[in-house]
Amino acid sequence: MGDDAAIITVPPEQELVVSTDMLVDGVHFSDRTTSAEDVGWRAAAANLSDLAAMGATPIGLTIGLGLPPTLGVDWVEALYTGFSQCLQHYGGVILGGDVCRSSVVTVSVTVLGQVRPDQKLWRSGARPGQVIVATGVHGASRAGLELLQQPQWGQDLSPLVRQALIQAHCRPQPRLDVLPYLRPFQAQGISVAGMDSSDGLADAVVQICEASGVGAQVWCDRIPMPPSFQETQSLNPEQALDWALYGGEDFELILCLPADGATTLVERLGNDATICGEVVAGSEVLLIGTSQSSATTSLRRAQGYQHF
Amino acid sequence: MGDDAAIITVPPEQELVVSTDMLVDGVHFSDRTTSAEDVGWRAAAANLSDLAAMGATPIGLTIGLGLPPTLGVDWVEALYTGFSQCLQHYGGVILGGDVCRSSVVTVSVTVLGQVRPDQKLWRSGARPGQVIVATGVHGASRAGLELLQQPQWGQDLSPLVRQALIQAHCRPQPRLDVLPYLRPFQAQGISVAGMDSSDGLADAVVQICEASGVGAQVWCDRIPMPPSFQETQSLNPEQALDWALYGGEDFELILCLPADGATTLVERLGNDATICGEVVAGSEVLLIGTSQSSATTSLRRAQGYQHF
């Protein structure tokens, strides 16, 4: 109490997982599309998703804030509300933080989680013969952003569908709920590799392949997208596929495991997951097209932040 | 490897300590007074000092960087060099980080350390009858800043002395080295309270007193200052005292323990520490003046960052 640092006990059978993220106004969020509460939720969710990507469960997070003196106290309170709502939903507490003056709103989050060594999720564990499972749908967050930036887009979608896409962008759901479903496989010594799709489905598949020294074939017609993508005239199939593969910020999990295990997993998740490709030998990560829609192409990494 | 998060094992007999700090160009550092290497060293040192303040030893830290696209790669490399030099000296590793675009250079550090529960240093443990020990000297960092900002100041000081004061500002030394000297007391069940003096000696004493529900008397003529403060015509005694009490960023430790233990501690530290006051009942934190120099006054908290 009164001490600047937080003290935590990590159970001896658990390892500690640490990850950090910095968000800057105008780069990672904007007043035009994101309320302060949503900035808080999204920052918390992105960091919790980093834990899910490792198979870890939340302990808590620290929040470093750089704030312009002109910013209202309401904004900061709403930001904390968003953080708290997300942590209340998924577990973890605010462990501490720092507030300082800055010319630009800056939110720096370091998240701590814990994982049993035998339940870790590694990018490097993919093996030829496994299949690729994507949880949820991909592209919804990107579509939600489009609706916020271009309200004339998707006018033929129902208000409820529009709202759901916007929610996907503003209130992403880290897939910590999937982890317990992986435990039975891990307990049997069945390797499960994977990571989250924060930078897009394609990026996740490529990163897993690079880390594992394998290739992959992703089946174009099995990429899980929101059903609404087929209901709107505003979106042609190429654009829809691009958003699903490269839109990013869906915070789903991309997993690689043996085919029979994958089928069981998809069933247990109530079909909230899709087998959408397979791991192969080599290093090529291909999107296998259908005759109707597209040719076979290579998947590529997301354009990360290139400083220099 | 390739995974965004770091995984750490915390020994079962240790608790984890977490603390976070954000530094912004123009607020916490300036190109005019601080090289990139020094910014890195100072950021690492300030965070390691937060650990020392809790009695904890370093595990490592994460670095979140917000960087303007115009900033040269040299600056960033020098920043990391400063971080690495400090960690090499005091222990701990860089556990991970994030780099993003920002309009202002921003450095966000979260430090992790570990401490055995019986070796924790609490602010709330000060008891009447104990004495107050300050390690090192206070005011040197503030004098170093003055030399950087006003080079005409202290022209009567030797180049070596000027350099030492500048070093105190640019390369502060967190007092992790003091912690092993506290262990014999802690092993005997002798309570040691304390914290670091990052916001100044006065602030540390006031914070310890507030957390412990006690008062204190600090003896004006026992405040440990650099010897050079008496050698220069640029500094009158009132200014010297103000820098020692309120200058901040000396990153020494302020400790409260029984008088005989304190005497032993000062001896064991080779007199690199001074008994400079006593803990008393009540809530007044007084600076006891001498007839020559100053009257008795109240010590006050540092002016922290007041956002609203």
Image: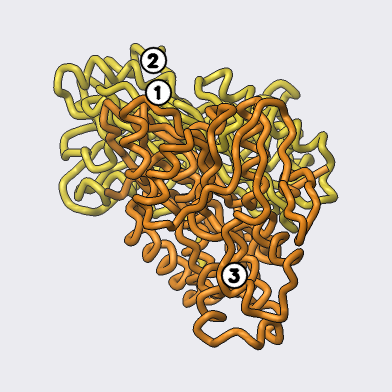
Chain colours: A yellow, B orange
Who's the residue at 45% across and 73% down the image? B78
Task: Name the outermost residue toward the front.
Answer: B291
Considering the numbered disc 3 on the image, is that residue within a helix, a strand or a loop? loop
B126 or A85, which lies in front? B126
Check the residue under mark 1 and report the chain it is in: A
In the rendered view, would you say A59 is above or below B286?
above
C-alpha gap between disc 1 and disc 3 = 39 Å
**Front in this rendered view, residue B48 or B144:** B144
Camera-nearest residue between B147 and A112: B147
Q: Residue B214, position in %: x, y?
A: 65, 28
Q: Secondary structure at mark 2?
A: loop
Image marks 2 and 1: residues in contact by CB distance under 8 Å: yes
Residue at 53% of width from left, 66% of height from top? B39
Q: Are marks 2 and 3 in contact (CB under 8 Å)?
A: no
Q: Is residue B190 left or right of residue A41?
A: left
Query: Residue A32, can we see it?
Result: no
Q: What residue did someone put label 1 on? A: A273
Q: Report the front residue among A291 and B268.
A: B268
Amino acid type at image mark 2:
Leu
Report in which chain the residue with disc 3 lies: B
Residue linked to disc 3: B69
Q: Residue at point 19% right, 17% down?
A: A187
- In the image, residue B91 sits, relative to residue B86, either above or below, namely above
Q: Position of residue A138 (x, y in %)?
A: 50, 34
Mark 1 falls on what kind of element?
strand
Q: Mark 2, chain letter?
A: A
